[in-house]
Amino acid sequence: MAARTARFGGILRSASIHNLIQDQEIKQYQGVIDLQNLDELSEQVYTPFDVEGRLLEAFDVPPSRRIPGVGRPPRDPKNPRINLFPLASDPLRTIPPAVTRAVALAAAEFGPVNILLNPHQLESAPYADALMGGLPGNVTITMEAMGFEDLVKIVSETDYGLFCDSAPCHLAKLYDVMGFAVFTTIPADMRVGRYRNFRAWQAKYRGRHCQAPCGLALLLTTPSGQRGCWETLGPDHAGYRRSRVIGDEKELLGFTFDRPVPCVAAVRDKASVLAKAVARDIRNRPVGRGTALQDADGV
């Protein structure tokens, strides 16, 4: 009897599987695995890890050879699609607008640039306002509602991207998209893993109570309701819990624009340096000039 390879699908929350995978596709799999069964996932907000590496270990399978992880050349070298994805679900991981603006100006020398924002996020409109004024004509800001399939399509068609630690960054691994990934609280080497399609920029900060990257994926809240990070809240960790500020517009905008946590502010203060690194990376890859691809060994 010929051997048959079993196919499995993974989902983070089994209750929401029908929102992400169509019924017809589900039938193609012998089983669907709830990834929440991986103990590390429940602690990822505090202790991030290499998700792909852990899954490969759990199922005892080698990395897929279908994803080389070196960065595919642009489909049209004379007209590369350069997309910037600066927003994460938490201001700890969002790229400061000053950085996005500087990168857009630098990347525009190589082709049209599109900055993609999510209209469902409260910070998107003021983020767009912060970018306005003085942008060249080949830089556009797109703020349109899109489903997961739309996001997959946009990321897969990107020739070069700017990413933070968010869904587009993870999707870019699957589609071998070249780009520059900016990491603040999350360790870059852990998120990038075996992939060399990215160059990674890690925030550099050392304070009284922490040193970047600390590993937080979400802001913390004290028992009294104060939000912040390890550095801003102090060394007494008793009773701290992870939290989101999505529903508190004033606080969300404060962390995004006026008073970012120290490691995010450190990235903001290096906007011009980071933009020059992005321009150099594009120039050294087959995006705008057609030069040989280099390994993404980080900056």
Image (tube, helix red, strand yellow):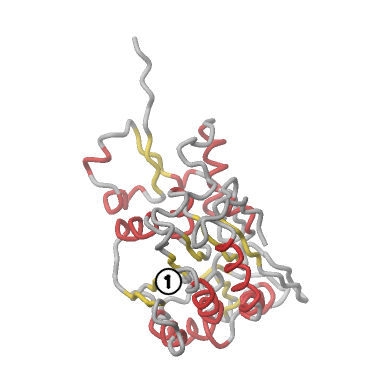
Name of the residue lying farthest toward the right: 208
Percent from the top left, x then y, of residue 116?
39, 71
- Above or below — where is 184 with respect to 290? below
* 262 displayed left or right of 125: right
Name of the residue lying farthest toward the bottom: 133
Q: Residue at image x 28%, y 34%?
A: 28
Percent from the top left, x then y, of residue 232?
67, 79
- Above or below — where is 235 with respect to 74? below
- Above or below — where is 137 with respect to 203? below
- Above or below — where is 143 with respect to 71? below
Name of the residue lying farthest toward the left: 24
Secondary structure of the residue carrying tag 1 is strand
Quadrant occupied by the C terminus: bottom right
Percent from the top left, x then y, of residue 225?
55, 80
Q: Residue at image x 50%, y 64%?
A: 163
65 or 226: nearer the viewer? 65
Residue 272 appears in which quarter of the rendering?
Answer: bottom right
169 or 284: nearer the viewer? 284
Quadrant occupied by the N terminus: top left
Q: Residue at image x 38%, y 16%?
A: 3
Q: How many marks?
A: 1
Percent from the top left, x then y, of residue 260?
59, 81
Q: Which residue is mark 1?
A: 113
96 or 277: nearer the viewer? 277
Q: Amino acid at mark 1?
A: Val
Few, some or many residues within 10 Å of mark 1 (<14, 14–19, 20+): many
270 or 126: nearer the viewer? 270
Q: Residue at image x 49%, y 35%?
A: 65
